[in-house]
Image (cartoon, rainbow, N blue to C red):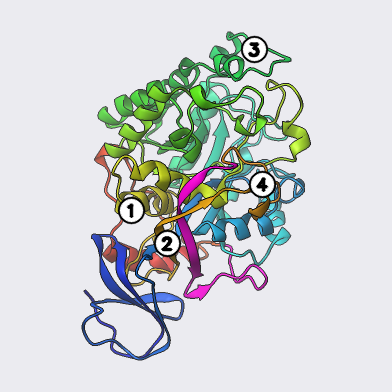
Amino acid sequence: MTHAVAPVDLLVVAQRAILPDGARAAAIAVSGGRITGILDPTGPLPAAAERIDLAADEVLMPALVDSHVHANEPGRTHWEGLRTLTAAAAAGGIGTVVDMPLNCIPATVDVASWDAKRASCPVPSIDVAGWAGAVGGRLDDLPALLEAGTRGAKAFMIDSGVAEFPALTTDEGLAEAMEILKAHELPLLVHAEDADVAARTPVHTGTHRYGDLLASRPPLVESMAIGRLAELAERTGAHVHVVHVSSAEGVAAVEIAQRRGIHLTAETCPHYLALCAEDLPDDDPAVKCFPPIRERHHQHALWAGLANGVLSMVVTDHSPAPWTLKDTGDLATAWGGIASIQLSLPVVWSAARQREVSLTELVAWMAERPADLAGLPQKGRIAVGADADLIAFAPDATFTVRGDELLHRHPQTPYEGRLLHGVVRTTWLRGRAVDPSAPHGRWLLPDAGAPAAASTTQGTASTTTGPGAASAALEDTR
């Protein structure tokens, strides 16, 4: 334990805190928005302008980091928007989000669009960073966009669903993007579904049957794409990160690449860990997403992939849309995306506790590793020098999901009526409780001339940035 001597702004005392080296009682000292001490609560404690003693049923955790969200602002703010998204995220225990370069208009594919996105909501409820877009015909704009403060880039191997974000379907285009990202020591995030394989799969139109939707994107679509990415990552030496892995075959493809020493990492999402195709109704467009939610044996493989380190993290892919775009009467044409950012922690925790997964593991998957992917070592951990982004979480408390009580713009959710474990009672951002009516979030940009720190998360061969490394790296990523 480290000890703060001088008086502090805030002291949070918890009977149980999730620290980088495990869970134990701790008093967290905060000054100037940063953690200045991790103290033994039974020993001498500094004077504090404010002291908070958590309740006996509350656990102190780092605020989560969600590196895969779609705010859709500017241009499609009626789909979500940064104000509603960040308010909902804070209510769910998330302190930082990294916004995807689509489905906003304009897509974030050049410096002007990146500037427009940040100007659309200069003071969000929580901290926000962003990914660049790596799209066909615009790769010449990518280096400047990375230098402007984006944390890496996102590409699609299949139709993205919006015309302004064309896919990189060829190996040549993907390799070119990888070379650019490697030169900047940043990751390329890829929606890994192979367009050619998908084109050979029958698509049922005018259907209400979930099984028809599932059959249109078999696991081979995902695993073939990951195999291609692995070959290209090996050739270029780039860090490639596969988003939203959904299948046992996808996990296996990632593991094969990692065993070959390829710098390929991967994530999955709450809906794949908590929902199974066998249990989904035929007439609920709220569950439509791509890749689709698959059968139970795929879910088991995803949990195993997290346990053995093949999958590094759990993030939401929060992708809302107006209900008129989802409830079309045809699952084939309904917008594919699940709105879940406020519920991600209780959804994952409710499933994890049944598998005897610890909160320490959950923090690694949902806070530390997403922060590392985005080059944000000051986020996602309770460590001296890190931002004092914290949550008071009651893991045994329960609630029933009611969509009309959620803060994101559209209330429809596949978890409607579910009883979930885990209630977020307070979220602090840099030592201040988050209040959406008086937001104090920031856009996270590297210092001029200092690139974002490269990710250290590499599957089974990875090391996760520890508290000492976090303290040393903080100034370069603010």
Label 2 environment density (alpha carbons within 10 Å; few <14, some 14–19, many ≥20): many
SS state under label 2: strand
Is residue 332 one of those drawn in magenta? Answer: no
- Which mark is first along the chain, 4 or 2? 4
Label 1 environment density (alpha carbons within 10 Å; few <14, some 14–19, many ≥20): some
Q: Amino acid at mark 3?
A: Val
- Which mark is first along the chain, 1 or 4? 4
In magenta, the rendered stretch is: 416-443
- Which mark is first along the chain, 4 or 3? 4
**Which residue bears the numbered disc 4?**
110
Quadrant in which residue 162 is drawn? top right
SS state under label 1: helix
**Which residue bears the numbered disc 3?**
203
Label 3 to label 4: alpha-carbon separation: 34 Å
> Which mark is in front, 4 or 1?
1
- Residue 77's x, y, as percent? 75, 50
Q: Is residue 163 above or below residue 312?
A: above
Relative side of 217 to 273, left or right: right
Q: Which mark is residue 76?
A: none
**Which residue bears the numbered disc 1?**
359
Task: Give yes or no for contact between labels 3 and 2 (Cβ–Cβ under 8 Å).
Answer: no
Seen at 58% across and 63% down, the residue is 443
- Which mark is first along the chain, 2 or 3? 3
Label 2 to label 4: alpha-carbon separation: 39 Å
Relative side of 367 to 279, left or right: left
Q: Amino acid at mark 2?
A: Phe
Which is more toward the observer, 26 or 131? 26
Label 3 to label 2: alpha-carbon separation: 43 Å
Seen at 47% across and 39% down, the residue is 269
